[in-house]
């Protein structure tokens, strides 16, 4: 299932806000619509956001092709700024925009139409490589999944969060396809319920045995010995291995340590921020209070209550047994190992 693609002169996305009740595709016809789709989480998940933003730049190039060269380049800069302002934590967004910026720099001398084509090709490459990369993560990750295993996962790291295959959920998919006897426990993932709405939907679609649990049941299950492995994704990984991922991940990692359950992060190397030494430097997005005070449009908390709604947390590297990438598995401790994965 392809989450994002180019269709005609538009970017086609799955509107993830409508799932699991409706599988609806929608077309973004200009870069502003792409930015809005990312900001409002019609598209979400670090690799999917990156690829969608790259296509957004191709749309901008298409839109402004008719302008004179100087105006055209200025419009591309505006588009890159607007897309970069949508969500701050997932580094894949900035990585993908950086790749497009490099292509613009290298091809500045070309006419607008051929520069558009170069940007479009770069966006297609980013999307295509994400699919291949995820499959490799699936192969490496399958290696650490026992023949029989009960796996806990958080948020959505599947097809929907990437271009097609998924990271942590891609490993689960690979293990299931390899005939392993796995059972998945999916955290519902308050407040946006990516686990209940999206992961559960993907698991049911693929007939992978799974059980949905409230987030706060995870510790109880681990204590009872019901979980063999925790597999999560990442939005940004610092060079020391500290990992930003969906809020609640840190609590899971601590619980996993307490209960001697191996805790792994699965992510493409495009999720590693090679510029930062530790998680201290990661900006954590804070989202609207309504995500907490309302469920499915129904108000569940009184007016006037204060709300704090961080979308991510940072798991210190020492809780993470290994980081599964398309280039192999890197085991803790990470110092001096992750920077070798660059390029
Ligand atoms: O706020 P979201 O839904 O974009 O957050 C997504 C996550 O935290 C995922 O775990 C992460 O992006 C990895 S997806 C392969």
Image (tube, grey):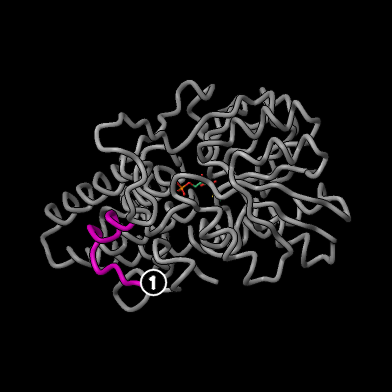
Report x, y in % for residue 167.
Answer: 62, 53
Total tally of numbered discs in the picture:
1
Query: Between residues 270 and 260, which one lies in front from this camera angle?
Result: 260
Q: Quadrant of the C terminus?
A: top right
Q: Magenta segment: does it hold 293?
A: no
**Left or right: 123 as drawn, with respect to 342:** left
Report x, y in % for residue 337.
Answer: 68, 29
Q: Residue at point 29% right, 62% down?
A: 115
| Residue that sits furthest to the right in the current view | 147
Q: Which quadrant would residue 63 be assigned to in this image?
A: bottom left
Query: Between residues 140 and 341, which one lies in front from this camera angle?
Result: 140
Report x, y in % for residue 194.
Answer: 50, 53
* Magenta-highlighted residues: 26-37
**Left or right: 150 as drawn, with respect to 304:** right
Q: Magenta segment: does it hold 28?
A: yes
Please, is residue 46 above or below residue 240 in the view? below
Q: Quadrant of the N terminus?
A: bottom right
- The residue carrying mark 1 is 6
**Left or right: 120 as drawn, with respect to 29:** right
Q: Which quadrant would residue 81 be assigned to in this image?
A: top left
Q: Residue at point 62% right, 72% down?
A: 205
Report x, y in % for residue 321.
Answer: 74, 32
Q: How many other residues sit within 10 Å of disc 1, few (<14), some (14-19) or many (≥20)?
A: some
């Amino acid at each position: 299932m392809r989450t994002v693609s180019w269709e005609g002169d538009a970017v086609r996305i799955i509107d993830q806000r409508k799932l699991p009740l409706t599988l609806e595709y929608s077309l973004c016809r200009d870069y502003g619509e792409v930015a809005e789709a990312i900001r409002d989480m019609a598209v979400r998940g670090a690799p999917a956001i990156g690829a969608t933003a790259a296509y957004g730049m191709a749309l901008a190039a298409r839109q402004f092709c008719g302008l004179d060269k100087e105006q055209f380049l200025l419009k591309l800069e505006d588009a890159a700024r607007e897309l970069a302002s949508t969500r701050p934590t997932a580094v894949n967004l900035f990585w993908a925009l950086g790749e497009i910026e490099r292509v613009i720099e290298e091809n500045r001398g070309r006419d607008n139409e051929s520069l558009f084509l170069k940007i479009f090709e770069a966006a297609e490459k980013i999307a295509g490589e994400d699919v291949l990369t995820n499959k490799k993560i699936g192969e490496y990750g399958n290696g650490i999944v026992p023949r029989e295993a009960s796996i806990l996962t958080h948020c959505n790291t599947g097809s929907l969060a990437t271009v097609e295959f998924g990271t942590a959920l891609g490993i689960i998919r690979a293990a299931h396809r390899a005939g392993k006897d796995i059972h998945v426990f999916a955290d519902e993932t308050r407040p946006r319920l990516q686990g209940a709405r999206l992961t559960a939907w993907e698991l049911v679609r693929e007939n992978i045995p799974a059980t949905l649990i409230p987030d706060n049941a995870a510790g109880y299950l681990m204590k009872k010995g019901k979980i063999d492995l925790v597999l999560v994704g990442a939005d940004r990984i610092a060079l020391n291995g500290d990992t930003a991922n969906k809020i609640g991940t840190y609590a899971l990692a601590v619980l996993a340590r307490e209960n001697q359950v191996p805790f792994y992060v699965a992510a493409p190397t495009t999720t590693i921020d090679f510029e930062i030494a530790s998680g201290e430097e990661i900006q954590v997005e804070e989202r609207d209070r309504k995500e907490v005070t309302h469920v499915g449009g129904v108000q569940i908390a009184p007016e006037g209550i204060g709300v704090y709604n961080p979308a991510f947390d940072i798991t210190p590297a020492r809780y993470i047994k290994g980081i599964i990438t398309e280039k192999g598995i890197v085991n803790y401790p990470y110092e001096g190992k992750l920077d070798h994965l660059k390029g």
